[in-house]
Amino acid sequence: MTETKDRLAKAALDHVPFDGMNMTALRSGARDLGMSPDTVSAYFPMGGADLAMWLHRQGDAELAEWLKTAPEGRMRDRIADAIEKRLQLADRELVRAASSVLALPHHQPMAARMMWETADTIWNGLGDSSRDVNWYSKRATLSGVYAACVLYWLGDTSEAQADTRAFIDRRIDGVMRFEKLKGQLRKIPGVGMLGDLATGWVRAPSATAPAEDR
């Protein structure tokens, strides 16, 4: 089933520039493969939103492979490199089409999940070993950074998207300053405990959460 779903998705993407990321593109892809268009809903029940998720996860999988041999260096540079690489792995026109679908209110939770999964891919690929509330805060923070970078990248007309890299660097620098301040604050008696209590609600079961938190 997975192989057929992949073939259908790839065929549908050829139609997205003309039809949009929707069920029409998926049905056209099915016809190209000699499949009945009626079978599309079995593989992509949410139509364009499911296709957007499939496309996004393909990019994350490629990023995970790249991270296995990514250059070493300062952590902030490695994070910035990973974000830049993830954007390079994406097709801007397809991302625009996906964004138009995911902007609908009932699909926004799925869009947030995509950002989280990319952040998780990056932290895992960089060898994150946190096993406390930092596991969540790191991914939540990077999700927001990545989402902002995607929006900037979509409108970037600079040569080789040089402005996007500068934007990424600024966002990462801002996060690093915040993390430094957070670390200093947690040294104050009682602040660390309050912080853990304030963010504890996010500790829902997760497929990728640290084992001891499940």
Image: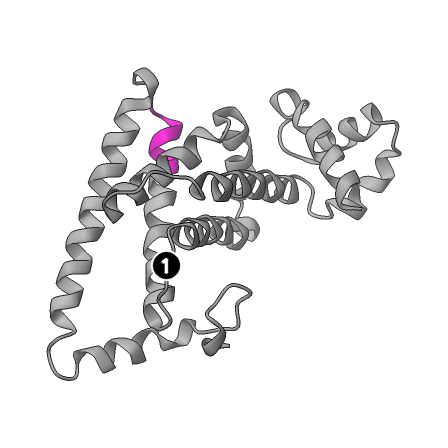
Residue occupying the point 75% across, 33% down: 7
Predominant SS of the magenta segment: helix
Of the pair 34 and 41, the residue shown nearer to us: 34
Q: Quadrant of residue 149?
A: top left
Q: Is residue 93 above or below residue 208?
A: above
Residue occupying the point 25% across, 34% down: 167
Q: Quadrant of residue 129?
A: bottom left
Q: Please name the amino acid that badge 1 sits on.
A: Asp
Residue 122 position within the rendered picture, expressed as x and y whole percent measured from the top left: 41, 49
Residue occupying the point 55% across, 31% down: 97
SS for dot 1 = loop
Q: Is residue 3 above or below residue 109?
A: above
26 sits left or right of 206 in the view: right
- Specify start and end residues of the magenta stretch as a single range: 150-157
209 sits left or right of 176 in the view: right
Residue 121 position within the rendered picture, expressed as x and y whole percent measured from the top left: 46, 50
The verdict on residue 59 being magenta is no
Q: How crowded is the residue under tag 1: few (<14 C-alpha within 10 Å), some, or many (20+)?
A: few
Q: Residue under label 1, please give it.
A: 128
Q: Residue furthest top?
A: 159
45 sits left or right of 214 in the view: right
Residue 109 position within the rendered picture, expressed as x and y whole percent measured from the top left: 52, 55
Q: How many marks?
A: 1
